[in-house]
Image (cartoon, helix red, strand yellow):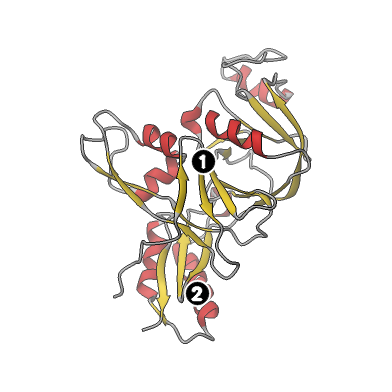
Amino acid sequence: MKKTLLAATVLLAATAFAEKYDLPPSDINVIGQVQQISAKQGETFYDIGREYGIGYDAMEHANQGVDGLYLREGEQVLLPTRFILPDAPREGIVINLPEMRLYYYPPNSNVVHVFAIGIGREGWGTPKGILSIKEKRANPTWTPPASIRAEHAANGDPLPAVVPAGPDNPLGLFAMRLSNPSYLLHGTNKPEGVGMRVSHGCIRLYPEGIEELFGMVGVGTQVNIVNQPMKVGWFGDSMYLEFHAPLGEDARTLEQNIAEARDTVHKSVASRGLRVENDLIDAVVREESGMPVEVAYYQ
């Protein structure tokens, strides 16, 4: 069985804000490289994820069997910083809900910025479709909808009619309203929820992430929200498969997911004469690690 190749495109910059990558040619859509670090005493997946701009669930899926709340000094931790770009035009903002990541393609620039996000929990799903940024606001106030105020009241946590701007505001310090006005891209006063399904449908970023994105995008920027738990991509003459747990409301059986993955890979490589590793395809789907794995290559 051929080993998975981890070397990839050059990582331009990694900060506590976002990660920026060279944008490859249109026939290559695997970017970045998996990194491995040694944990410090007392660190958690949240601490490491926030430092590297990675959501909590992504850290857990990439490090299965590791206790992310009680990391030992020197314990090896994988950073899932290799991605297959979503199957969408490389334009504006692209959000893939199952992987809980936002990709921003600046105009007239050959790079892509990748941000961790939190999305709407089941029953309050983040909408799919092509939207746009309609309004940007620093230090926003929040006027909770009646439905959210009723939910909080029922839980013994009543909300005021208007939450003032400031560090305790659930929108954080920066917010961008979408063309569907019920939804925003915003910061948060609870950054530990970034990378999870915790919101009422809005899209949350780390405080550092929203500040950086807010400064880069303009009103009118396209926001393409897709639902792609499975992504396939090319790097050189090899095909990679990346699989994320489908959203709960879209869940199917393991057998269905494996069958779809095999069918997609085989159809994609049919004209190239590549060797396809079905056992690797099956493992990628079962493990739901969210990291690209080489599943087809020239012998």
Above or below, comparing residue 263 to residue 289 in the picture: below
Residue drawn at 55 percent across, 35 percent down: 209
Residue drawn at 65 percent across, 42 percent down: 126
The extreme left residue here reads 73
Q: Please indicate whether residue 102 sits to the left or right of residue 80 in the image.
A: right
Asked if one can make out residue 41 in the rendered structure from this viewpoint, the answer is yes
Q: Which mark is residue 268?
A: none
For label 1, the SS is loop
Above or below, comparing residue 161 to residue 216 in the picture: above
Instruction: Tell which of 198 and 73 is nearer to you.
Output: 73
Dot 1 alpha-carbon crowd within 10 angstroms: few under 14, some 14 to 19, many 20 or more: many
Residue type indicated by callout 2: Val
Instruction: Tell which of 238 and 67 is nearer to you.
Output: 238
Above or below, comparing residue 180 to residue 191 in the picture: below
Q: Please indicate whether residue 87 sits to the left or right of residue 4 in the image.
A: right
In front: mark 1 or mark 2? Answer: 1
First in residue order: circle 1 vs circle 2: 1
Instruction: Tell which of 16 and 290 is nearer to you.
Output: 16
Quadrant into which the C terminus falls: bottom left
Residue drawn at 57 percent across, 54 percent down: 250
Q: Please indicate whether residue 153 sits to the left or right of residue 83 in the image.
A: right
Residue type indicated by callout 1: Ala
For label 2, the SS is helix
Specify the quadrant of the image occupied by residue 33.
Answer: bottom left
Q: Which mark is residue 265?
A: 2
Quadrant into which the N terminus falls: bottom left
Residue drawn at 37 percent across, 54 percent down: 34
Above or below, comparing residue 187 to residue 64 in the picture: above
For the residues labelled 1 and 2, the Cα–Cα distance comes to 30 Å
Specify the quadrant of the image occupied by residue 133.
Answer: top right
Give the residue pinned by disc 1.
Answer: 18
Circles 1, 2 touching at the beta carbon (< 8 Å): no
